[in-house]
Image: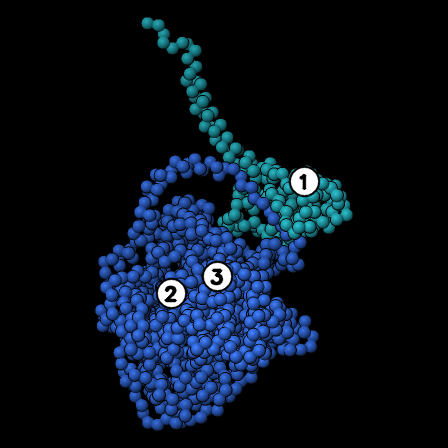
Chain colours: A blue, B cyan
Amino acid sequence: MSREYWRSLAQIEDLPEYRAALEREFPEGASELPEGMTRREMMMLVGASLSLAGLTACRRPVEEIVPYVAPPEEVVPGVPRYYATTMPFRRSAYGLIVESHEGRPTKIEGNPAHPSTLGGSSTRVQASVLGLYDPDRSQSIRLKGARKSWNDFVMAWGELSKAHAADGGARLAVLSESFSSPTLARLASELRTRFPKLQWATYDAVSDENRLAGLRQVVGRDVDLMLRFDQAAVILCLDADPLLTDPETIRHARGFADGRRAGTTGGTMNRLYAVEGVYSLTGAMADHRLRLESRQIAAFTAALAARLGAPGTSGQVDVPGVDQRWLDAVAKDLLANRGKSLIIAGERQPAGVHAAVCALNAHLGNTGKTVSYRETKDAALSSLSSLTALVSAMNSGAVQTLMILGGNPVFDAPADLDFAMAMSKVPHTIALGHTVDETSSRAEWHIPHAHYLESWGDARAVGGTLSVVQPLILPLFGGRTPVEVLGLMVGDKDRPGYDIVRDTWKTILGAEFDSKWNRVLHDGLLAGSELTEVVPVVKGESFAELARATGSSSGLEIVFVPSPSLHDGRFANDAWLQELPDPLTKLTWDNPALVSPKTAEMLSVVNEDLVRLDYGGRSLELPVWILPGMADGVVALTLGYGRQRVGRIGAGVGFDTFKVRASKAPGFDSGVTLSKLGRKYPLSATQDHGSMEGRPIVRESTLTELRSPKEEEGERRSALGVFEEKPEHFSLWNPHTYDKGHQWGMTIDLNTCIGCNACMVACQSENNVPVVGKDQVSRQREMHWLRVDRYFSGEPSGNPEVVFQPVPCMQCEDAPCEQVCPVAATVHDGEGLNVMVYNRCIGTRYCSNNCPYKVRHFNFYNFTKDTPDILKLAMNPDVTVRSRGVMEKCSYCVQRINRAKIDTKLAGRELRDGDVRTACQQACPASAIEFGDIRDASSRVAKAKADPRNYALLEELNTKPRTTYLSKVRNPNPDLERATS
Amino acid sequence: MGQIFPSSWNKLPLIAAIAVVLGPTLATAGVWYYFSPWYTDVGYSPVQPVPYSHRLHVGELGLDCRYCHASVETSNIANIPPTQTCMNCHLTVKKDSALLAPIRDSAQSGRPMHWIRVHKLPDYAYFTHRAHIGAGIGCVSCHGRIDQMERVTQMMPLSMGWCLDCHRNPTPNRRPVSEVTNMRWTPPRDVRVLAAQLGRPVNPPTECSGCHR
């Protein structure tokens, strides 16, 4: 079977400009300085001064050694220490292990014992360490912009609290983000006791409110669900993205990958159906994907319920524009897998859909098996109506003092509420914020919000597991935590967060507190703290809502999607996340409106065209990007960009789509118009960087093909996309022998890789990979050692399928780069590593020209020169920081290999499989990457390489790559075969 | 017509020939030596804020290296001792010495000492003390007779070629791990005894990735 893969629409059109750009290793003008001076001119000018300046380097620099005065106990200089902590994110809690060098956290990994990470991580977890050292974080408490001290605030609060205590807090209000934390919940309830008339609002811009409301309808109280992908054989996602933008992404990815992996080792492979309008990562992983506007999902669910024979439904309902065979086939598959199926509705779908999905899961016998429900204990649940009520109270002057406990409502509250205006009517506003952001700059008091790596706190993960947020470092900028601020509000006393959290845990842990507490801190969780399951009793009327939820379906549909990188904008000043290409669009540093090719044709717009978007009486100018696979008629706006007051990285990057988001429809709505402005806005996408010219790069097959009988070996191999005939290799070079010691190798399973980019950020964090900025990305100068290529296949204007392929250095045994280096700056070592010797490199870039995989990256500038001192603390001390004029690339984390080798040597034992884990492998939530010694036949990587799906990239070039891939396997429904559009 | 060139000029070709041979040789030899770390780095002996004498502390009083450089066996770096380590003794010994004033000030104020680094490797070279100690490389092999130094002086060039000499043939520099800090250790006469003391052979990396990342 041969499939055509393409990376972009430009590639399909194959315009001359595209070819020209593609065929150059470096884009035109790559050697030019931005000021317009050519490199040649520059060299002439500086030549003389360089030759003189060179001599000064002969003087030996005097370097100081500054030891401790009194060394902290247990800190051995040069030996990293690891601590367990928790990153709270909305109501989720990621259990983490953080690496700390002499007291500065540098690298974050998932805690293998914690159920929400299971040792994996995600882009936002990996990048959060950079947020700690963000030099643009607020550095002091401010009163109307003037610097004040914490004591000043404590005194000011004392005055306010006396006044409010008099009337029971009737004129006091608190606005918080959602949380799930025993200490915060305890303090909140104590605050309500102290101020019984207090008004409390909880608001998340991207929230699970609809889901909780739907479950409340069914169950009758506040419960949340926990998905068990690993138990599911058939999964149907309705406008949902559980694999990327959902807070529980790590756990979902692991479960989903386990279900995929099982299929390639003889077990049952799960089958994923996705029904969605905006191409999501989950949709990209789907075996069958149906393009459907978000507003049609309710009707789809009703039609599905009828086909599933759910109680309370009757007759056959059809959905306009949906192939009925598709519905029938999905319903049949779900019914055939009772107890092993799973239906998931997306966060932006209305409560009615969530209630119906809960009922359908119960009807299919999935409750307690693939989906379980638990009370939302110790939680503040996001509620848009509480915010609306708060804003009207503020506008009416009923609020004297407003405490904003984190969050950025001026930026992300619905535009119709005009939170900034309401805030100006409140005499005393206090905002806790990481930066002096849009909200804090309008508040009377601003308090710097401590980063979680500086905070004492606690959290309850989805499922109930309790863990403690343990600080790795004292607050760098004197930040305070919500726990401390609430603690002050409750008791009028300034108490350290540590004492407050321990107070809560004294009741949780009971007797022998100190030893149990130390155990919790050490393990990173309290064993046995999961909540018991709630079994919902489903009443019949769950489907009645659906008819009402189905709105009008005419005209363009606007859909608001959280950014995979910045989420709701909270990570906007994180350079790693800004430069991370979006999984589907491969865009960096921007958030254009996404439309399908047909919609673009209808609107007669092309990529980078600026349009004016009118919706609900508000308008916004932003560029357009055509994303194949979007439902026709859908305009997707990514949230989180366009922050104005956030810092030097994120300010003014992208477009503020919150400006048009209204409280009546925070998820999706009809009634949007786009009009072309006739101007262009340049966007930086990496989708065509490093194209490999249509050669068989990604390979895929179906499960049926994979399992076809052994007799037809040749046919089967070709079905797997592996070479039918091994090309006859002949080398001009004396073959290297790799028969001694460790021989490192890697496999990447395209079947389980979900393309989430966690590996990219992990690599960036581990290897000090610089950020280059939007302009440099557009010149193809991004430095990511590991990129994730995204290939489409199928009809561009229809429903193309996607394959993701992470591409690190292939560590070729016959490396083309080595043969052309004139200074032997890239050479091979005896363990099969293609090593890069920075101090030999003179920057000819021949190696990159000769690399068929395009994995080498050149430092066109000294990208780390202007790094603020504080950001240097985030650097890995075990890896060289590269300078200008040097080529760099993936090293298989050679620093980790060396560390493990020395560790095992000193321990007097042999290196075992698993002692060395690369950063990408460790971060991968799907465990798609294996790394180890390929000479050790019992190693996981050697076993993976023995898989019939194993193939090498561009094998015919005889480069003998050490990194190989396991081909992707799709599991289509025989009733449907290839997806209909 | 008289002779333009005097007869003494007859030696010119000879002189020229010698110059042609000798000049480049001397230049090469000069660069070879004067541009190498044997000349530029060996002998570097900066004045430290406190004239700490290794000759006194190690040579005469017999302190073990690891009393101060405690992390040498477990860490990549052999730490410079914290002020507290000095004060362990100097709270009672020579507690009024003027030379120790900076140490006392540091202990009192909490401001750390600023020592001058003597043995410096380039930033892209990742040397690990713990691996070398574990392999039985004595301190003296790289640092020289510290116990005889009034002021620490760099004795070895610490150049890559010098490192590789040992990495290619480590045995002459190996000793039992228990004798690593012994400045006066001499190998036993009997090679078999030494081999038994050394235990398993070491296998130091000689490739770029061993030390550069």
Specify the subunit that label 1 lies on.
B
Q: Residue beneath label 3, please? A: A145
Q: Which residue sits at x=32%, y=5%?
A: B1
Residue A498 visible somewhere in the drawing? no
Q: Earlier in the sequence, mark 3 or mark 2?
A: 3
Q: Nearer the viewer, mark 3 or mark 2?
A: 3
Say which residue appears at 23% left-offset and 64% top-offset.
A678
Q: Secondary structure at mark 1?
A: loop
Dot 2, how many residues are within 10 Å of its Cα: few (below 14), some (14-19), or many (20+)?
A: many
Disc 1: which residue: B51
Label 1: how many Cα within 10 Å (few below 14, some 14–19, many 20+): few
Q: Amino acid at mark 2?
A: Gly
> Residue A828: horizontal and vertical position, in percent?
45, 51
Chain of the residue under label 2: A
Q: Are marks 1 and 2 on the same chain?
A: no
Q: Quadrant of residue A524?
A: bottom right
Discs 1 and 3 carry the same chain letter: no
- The answer to whether residue A231 is above or below residue B32 is below
The quadrant of the rendering that contains the C terminus of chain A is bottom left
Distance from the alpha carbon under mark 3 to that under mark 2: 23 Å
Please give the label number shown on residue A642: 2
